[in-house]
Amino acid sequence: MSTPPPLSVIVACKNPGPRLPAALASVWEQRWVEPELIVIDGGSTNGTREWLETQRARLATLVSEPDGGVYDAMNKGIAAAQGEWVLFLGADDRLLGEMVLSEALNWMKRTEAGVAAGEAAYDDGRIYKLRSRVNPLARNFVHHQAAFYRRSLFAENGGFDASLAIMADYDFNLRLWKNRVRFKPIPLRIAACGVRGMSDSGHWRGYREEIAVRHRYFPAPRCLLWDALSITRFLRKRVWRALSRPRG
């Protein structure tokens, strides 16, 4: 019986852009650890499916079929995963450095936490990291591109709510937080992230889902201030995009 891998990396995609090969290469280039690489493709029609077939020998699992959205695809990846820890990497993202997974696993060996999270650096200069003391009411406090989840958490707490298009990771993180799962910051920059992701799109649906998820776990009076701040963030982003739009 083979020994399960220490880490599974799950990439969910559908008609991704040209950065997918770089995302996968950043996993293949890792040293001192051989992560299990799982790709769940939602039935791409732009040539991605055919290219992935040429790489099948380098993938632990490849699934290419229609799905119910990115979180449905991530749940499929979890079902296929064998690693003790799971990392979700976007098709537009890449791991930072060929030793980053080995270094992260060294940190995770020293913790009893269920989630260990480093930094995610976005192409536009923003950097997100898990704070030692979080306010789960405010907004999503863990970015999955830099977060390692114990795989057992999904069996114990359920998977992602695929009825949510954008904020199912916030919902899952709040579920873990409510169930007293420990979140541990680790001092590593894990991934460089593109700015074209769904949660970064600025569409109202993302803010609406954030508010709805918040109300699942906290009473309405506690949510009011943070709901207002979510609406303010949405309006501010709309104004910024309108002002920065090229004038023709």
Image (spheres, rainbow, N blue to C red):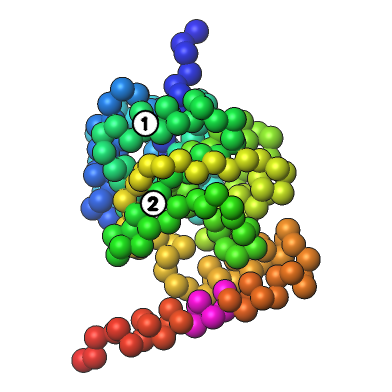
Residue 127 disc label:
none
**What residue is rendered at 24% in x and 91% in y?**
247
Q: Report the residue marked by disc 2.
A: 120
Residue 194 point in image, percent of width and height: 32, 58
Please say whether residue 28 is visible from this viewpoint.
Answer: no
Marks 2 and 1: which is nearer the front?
1
**Image quarter of residue 198:** bottom left
Q: Which callout, 2 or 1, points at the residue further toward the start of the chain?
A: 1
Q: Position of residue 112 (x, y in %)?
A: 59, 30
Residue at image location 74% in from the left, 69% down from the top = 222
* Residue 115 appears in the picture as rendered: yes
**What residue type is disc 1 on?**
Glu
Q: Quadrant of the C terminus?
A: bottom left
Out of 7 and 137, give the one closest to the viewer: 137
Residue 76: give x, y in percent of width and height: 52, 39
SS of the residue under disc 2: strand
Q: Residue furthest left?
A: 248
* Residue range (magenta): 230-235
* Crowding near the residue tagged with mark 1, few <14, some 14–19, many ≥20 C-alpha atoms within 10 Å: some
| Residue for badge 1 | 103
Left or right of residue 131, residue 53 in this image: left
Q: Residue at x 28, y 55 (%)?
A: 17
Position of 163 relative to 3 (above/below): below
Residue 143 vs 245, above or below: the answer is above
Decide whether the magenta segment is chiefly helix, strand or loop.
helix
Above or below, 2 against 85 in this view is above
Rounded to the nearest angstrom, the CA distance separating label 2 from label 1 is 15 Å
- Residue drawn at the location 58% of the way across and 76% of the way down: 229
**Tag 1 secondary structure:** helix
Residue type for callout 2: Ala
